[in-house]
Amino acid sequence: MNVKEHTIKDIITESLIKSMSYPAYRKLVSVVVAEGKSTGDKQSEALSNYSMLNDKRMKRLDKTTRLTESHIEAIKLYDEEVTWLVLTESWCGDAAQTMPMMNKIAELNDKIDFKVVLRDDNPELMSEFLTNGNLSIPKLIAFHPETKEVKGTFGPRPSIAIQMVAAYKKEHGALDPEFKRDLQVWYNKDKGQNTAEDLVALLK
């Protein structure tokens, strides 16, 4: 058990060296989009198009994302040092919908250090935090900045969306374009509130 914990600590430490701030990540996405590319090992027209859409989405959400008064109060009362390290890529729609809220929360409390790493550049870290055996992103890992003890995780979607995906897969076997459109409609209606609830719960 100690060997495993030590390994995870080392992997987190190494990944932090490659991490960037949220503003740096946003700049990176804008740069790759301007070049007609995406982040990550694979390049395709589809991934480039998703990245372009997500860049526009994050620009909008960075400006419009709002927290409730009760969430703001809970976030400001949080009094322990924590690092939030999120694995992502520019083409990920769920990341584009949730990362602006992650950043908004971190901005309210200087105890929360919000960092971003690219999934394909950090395969060891990703392999430690799979979702049902999959390389699903975004994946936020919350840990103590000194000991690297993992406090919890969030992702790849907020809790209600996870339930929606599970129910659809149970009935239909797989996600299709129609469901993915419905999921984006849900995100737009929810306005980040389910993400906020989950992240505030993570702080507790």
Image: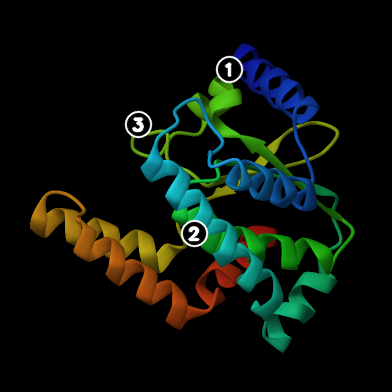
Looking at the rendered image, the disc whose residue lies closer to the viewer, 3 or 1, is 3
Q: Which residue is mark 3?
A: 133
Among the 4 quarters of the image, the one containing residue 67: bottom right
Please identify the residue farthest to the top as the structure is shown: 3
Residue 124 image offset from top left, x and y in percent: 56, 20
Quadrant of the drawing holding the N terminus: top right
- Please name whichever residue, 107 or 153, is drawn nearer the observer in this view of the structure: 107
- Amino acid type shown at disc 3: Gly
- Amino acid type shown at disc 2: Leu
- Figure disc tally: 3
Tell me the distance, in whole angstroms, between the alpha carbons under discs 1 and 2: 43 Å
- Please name whichever residue, 171 or 179, is drawn nearer the observer in this view of the structure: 179
Which badge, 3 or 1, is on the more N-terminal residue? 1
**Residue sitting at x 9%, y 56%:** 172
Residue 72 image offset from top left, x and y in percent: 76, 79
Where disc 3 sits, the SS reads loop
Q: Which residue is mark 1?
A: 1
- Amino acid type shown at disc 1: Met
Which badge, 3 or 2, is on the more N-terminal residue? 2
Q: Is residue 38 visible?
A: yes
Q: In the image, is residue 148 above or below residue 181? A: above
Q: Which residue is mark 2?
A: 53
Q: In the image, is residue 80 above or below residue 121? A: below
Quadrant of the drawing holding the C terminus: bottom right
Circles 3 and 2 in contact, beta carbons < 8 Å: no
Please identify the residue farthest to the right as the structure is shown: 110
Q: In the image, is residue 36 above or below residue 2? A: below
Q: In the shown orientation, is residue 115 left or right of residue 4?
A: right
